[in-house]
Amino acid sequence: MRRALAGIALAVTSMVALSFLVPLALLVREQARDQATTVAEQRAAALSPVLALTTERADVQQAVAELGSPEQLAVRLPDGGLVGTPHAPREALDRAVRAGRRSPWIPPTAGSTSSPWCCRATGSPWWRPSCRPPT
């Protein structure tokens, strides 16, 4: 009888511990992902003024190096070159370009006076939460 009660107590304790630890693990994973996304957005926001002024490889390389994250940040230049270390396979990047699923950034057109890297609809930087046509 004691053995049965000890087994039941162990089972209940294990279920209570698991009911606490599983959601905790999911929360920690979500927090880590949110933190990584926030850091990436901050780095992109810090780089956007440079891209608004120039897309010269040397200038972009210097800006990426000054951010201290050339191994964590990649910039695709309008000529197709990459600055930094890309994490996506080259085939995936090429396929996204061919499919037309680019980021909301567009290179300037000839004679354009707008920012060279802006949202197609509003002209706002890509890191803003919305890129919708003006109302």
Image: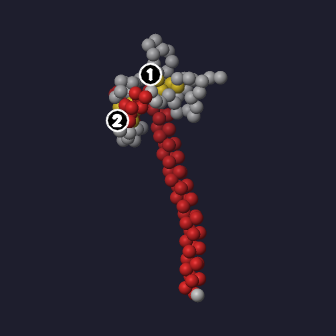
Residue 18 x %, y %: 55, 66
Compared across the picture, whether 48 is left or right of 23 comes to left
Compared across the picture, whether 109 is left or right of 4 comes to left
- Residue 123 drawn above or below residue 72: above
Can see residue 112?
Answer: yes
Residue 124 x %, y %: 55, 26
Looking at the rendered structure, the kind of residue marked 2 is: Arg
**Residue 90, labelled with which disc?**
2
Quadrant where the N terminus sits is: bottom right
**Residue 49, labelled with which disc?**
none
Quadrant where the C terminus sits is: top right
Q: Residues within 10 Å of mark 2 (few under 14, many from 20)?
A: few
Can see residue 65?
Answer: no
The residue sitting at 45% across, 19% down in the picture is 108
Looking at the rendered structure, the kind of residue marked 1 is: Pro
The residue sitting at 45% across, 27% down in the picture is 100
Mark in front: 1 vs 2: 2
Residue 110 x %, y %: 44, 13
The residue sitting at 51% across, 30% down in the picture is 126
Name the residue furthest bottom. Answer: 1
Nearest to N terminus: mark 1 or mark 2: 2
Compared across the picture, whether 48 is left or right of 17 comes to left
- Residue 16 drawn above or below residue 30: below
Q: CA distance from mark 1 to mark 2?
A: 21 Å
Residue 3 x %, y %: 55, 85
User: Element under label 1?
Assistant: loop
The answer to the question of whether label 1 and label 2 lie on touching residues, with beta carbons closer than 8 A, is no
Q: Decide which of 126, 4 is in the foreground and name it.
A: 4
**Residue 107, labelled with which disc?**
1
